[in-house]
Image (cartoon, helix red, strand yellow):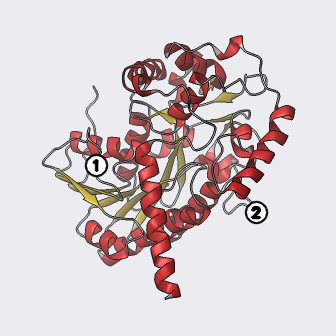
Amino acid sequence: MKPRPPVPAVCVVTGGTGFVGQRLVEMLVERGAKKVISLDIVPPPADAWRHPNIEWRVCDVTDKEGVSAAIRGADCVWHNAAAVGPFHPTPLYTRVNYEGTLNVLAACKEHRVPKLVFSSSPSTRFTGANVDGLREDEMPELPLKSYLQEYAATKARGELAVRAACCDALMTVSVAPHQVYGPRDNLFLPNLLEAAGTGRLRVFGKGFNRICFTHVDNYCHGLIIAERALKKNSPALGQFYITTDGKTHPKGEQYLIFWKELDRAVVGMGFTSLWSKTHLATWFLTPIAYACRGLEIILRTTIKLNPFNVRVLTMHRWFDIVNAERDLGFEPIVEYEGGWVETIAWFKEHWLPGFNASGSMVGGIAAQSQAKIDIQEASRKEDLARVKA
């Protein structure tokens, strides 16, 4: 293994019990951090690393005082906390993704924290058009006139605030992955595998849309080395970068065929291959997805089939990561083939035994993620009740 550059002595990771956050906390300690404070709204999971250099602190990112107390004394903050995916109550996105980011920025300024690395998302630049090998500077500039989902809109607002805050006293950078995967994933792969295992998932469209993946270790590596790029006159200051598995994807290209690779995981669980079933044309799926969106509003629930999911599962969405390679010195530390095989094996051992073949089209997120949503939504309602009182 190549020697890694040093990391700050005192690190703070918001969203530190999440899929990416938990691995980031671990990697910072593995690379020599003396103290890593994980700040999240739920306690650490049972498999969390109980290392003397890690402090697992329970705190809502919307709690200004709690955030300020956690950040005091930090050498760098990695702001990962977010309401992720399409299943949250709409007001929660603004509360967590935008207002929570403002709290983190305010605490950094208050305590003179010199660096902040913001975990962003490529979806902040998605318009619905194909993204076929673009660099970050070839994508639309923020803010967009409209966004495909509320998550993207509020993440964009958060990123713009982070960019505006960048100065000599607080140097900032935004780094995003695309389609993170790996052991302990609790959103992307579990949802698709559940749909496949219950027999409801079909290939959308022709099934040859190009996409890029990012192993969780590669993304965390990108987040960590981004801190090193935060220095005076750095081209990375205030910028946005995307990190992926790069040229380790099949055939040395920076993309793969999404439905072909997903089918490897589906078959790996012992489920029927998606390619042996009838494909669903987009002209057929789209009106149904909009009907489901209407039912979501009427019934106040969440349905897995929606217009956003249809679009992202049929469009090309892969990136040229030359900017991150040049400005951050990024290169993947886990090759795609080994990472994907490891992930499939992990899901077969850890996810498959608890799989429920009678799963429904409603809801569909991991219990740990749902717990965060429930707590955050309860806190929001309490705040509203206090204001009305």
Q: Amino acid at mark 2?
A: Lys
- Horizontal side of 362 relative to 39 (left or right) equals right
User: Is any atom of residue 81 visible in this view?
Assistant: no
Q: Nearer the viewer, residue 159 or 345?
A: 345
Q: Is residue 283 left or right of residue 96?
A: right
Q: Which residue is mark 2?
A: 145
97 vs 311: above or below: below
Res 274 → quadrant: top right
Q: Residue at x 73, y 22 (%)?
A: 208
Q: Where on the picture, by quarter, is residue 273?
A: top right
Q: Is residue 301 visible?
A: yes
Q: Element under label 1?
A: loop
Tell me the mark number nearer the camera, choosing from 2 and 1: 1
Q: Secondary structure at mark 2?
A: loop
Residue 329 percent location from the top left of the image: 43, 40
From this view, report whether residue 259 is shown above or below residue 380.
above
- Tell me the distance, in whole angstroms, between the alpha carbons under discs 2 and 1: 38 Å
Residue 123 versus residue 244 in the image, above or below: below
Q: Nearer the viewer, residue 199 or 77?
A: 199
Q: Amino acid at mark 1?
A: Pro
Residue sticking out furthest to the left: 52
Query: Which residue is labeled 1 in the image?
Result: 44
